[in-house]
Image (cartoon, rainbow, N blue to C red):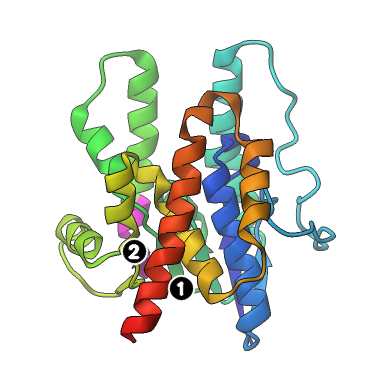
């Protein structure tokens, strides 16, 4: 049986849509892809189903063993250390046939993995644009230096998953080839752009997945968003709910077309 190791974002990123995408994908694969052995590399910050017991050998219960520090700069340093060194080093010690990084901004993990094919889901090319804009402060120079490392690793992946033909074309242009770029036939990026925020892509795709595998009522996800959306992102609360419903509509339309 082929084993697949899924790599979600760290909970300290506090990005609920990414957490829910990782949660639903892992649940869906475990339920329906019975020919695969699915494992998750770390704790998922906001599950949309009942939390399972931690797998032996993972650090699900203590994903990042650092205290919350008293200053923003110290917390940023903690986040960078966890994201770019501690997390990848732990993933490197795991065993699997295939590595699937669920967020392109974690593509640096690819550099730490030499045990089999490496797949990355690419939601957008914002890191490319960020680096192209350059930097004017020390914080921006550090950020861009780390992003350049992420982008170099992204180029070396063995396969990429994207949401639209448009994004496939953009990624192919950046990579210099279109080999092994696989498209999910839901125009999530276009809908996210219509709604005004590229990061809403994850909620669009989550809605499409729930339409195909209705394992959780829509009301439960609305409640989870209301309860767990961080204060600094609550301005996107209604947009997240709208993106979820647009994803459901897109999946229904695709089903009819097929």
Q: Nearer the viewer, residue 16 or 6?
A: 16
Mark 2–mark 1 distance (CA, rounded to whole Å): 20 Å
Spot occupied by residue 75 in the image (x, y as percentages of width and height): 60, 21
| Classed neighbour count for the residue bearing mark 1: other residues with Cα under 10 Å, few (<14), some (14–19), many (≥20) | some
Name the image quarter holding the C terminus.
Answer: bottom left
Spot occupied by residue 51 in the image (x, y as percentages of width and height): 79, 56
- Residue 117, which numbered label? 1
Of the two numbered discs 2 and 1 in the rendering, the one whose residue sits closer to the viewer: 2
Q: Residue at 36% across / 82% down in the picture?
A: 256
Q: Residue at 69% across / 37% down in the picture?
A: 227
Spot occupied by residue 169 in the image (x, y as percentages of width and height): 17, 63
Name the image quarter holding the N terminus.
Answer: bottom right
The answer to whether 161 appears left or right of 240 in the picture is: left
- The magenta stretch is 153-162
The answer to whether 101 appears left or right of 127 in the picture is: right
User: Residue 161 lies in magenta, yes or no?
Assistant: yes
Q: Residue tagged by mark 2?
A: 163
Instruction: State which tag comes first along the sequence, 2 or 1.
Output: 1
Q: Is residue 182 visible?
A: yes
At numbered mark 1, what does the secondary structure look like: helix, strand or loop? loop
| Classed neighbour count for the residue bearing mark 2: other residues with Cα under 10 Å, few (<14), some (14–19), many (≥20) | many
User: Residue 128 lies in magenta, yes or no?
Assistant: no
Q: Residue at 52% across / 40% down in the picture?
A: 84
């Amino acid at each position: 049986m082929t084993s697949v190791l899924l790599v979600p974002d760290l909970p300290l990123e506090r990005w609920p849509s990414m957490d829910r995408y990782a949660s639903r994908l892992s649940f869906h694969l475990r339920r329906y892809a019975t020919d695969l052995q699915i494992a998750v590399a770390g704790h998922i910050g906001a599950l949309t189903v009942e939390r399972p017991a931690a797998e032996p050998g993972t650090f699900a219960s203590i994903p990042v063993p650092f205290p919350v520090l008293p200053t923003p700069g110290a917390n940023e340093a903690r986040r960078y250390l966890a994201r770019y060194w501690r997390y990848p080093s732990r993933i490197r010690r795991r065993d699997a046939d295939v590595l699937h990084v669920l967020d392109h901004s974690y593509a640096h993990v690819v550099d730490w993995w030499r045990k089999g094919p490496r797949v990355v889901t690419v939601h957008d090319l914002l890191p490319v644009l960020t680096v192209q804009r350059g930097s004017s402060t020390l914080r921006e120079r550090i950020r861009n230096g780390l992003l350049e490392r992420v982008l170099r690793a992204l180029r070396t992946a063995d396969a990429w998953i994207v949401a639209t033909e448009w994004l496939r074309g953009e990624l192919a242009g950046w990579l210099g080839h279109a080999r092994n770029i696989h498209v999910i036939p839901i125009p999530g990026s276009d809908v996210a752009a219509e709604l005004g925020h590229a990061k809403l892509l994850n909620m669009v795709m989550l809605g499409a997945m729930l339409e195909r595998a209705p394992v959780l009522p829509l009301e439960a996800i609305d409640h989870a968003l209301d309860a767990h959306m961080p204060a600094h992102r609550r301005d996107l609360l209604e947009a997240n709910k709208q993106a979820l419903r647009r994803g459901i509509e897109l999946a229904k339309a695709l089903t009819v077309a097929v």
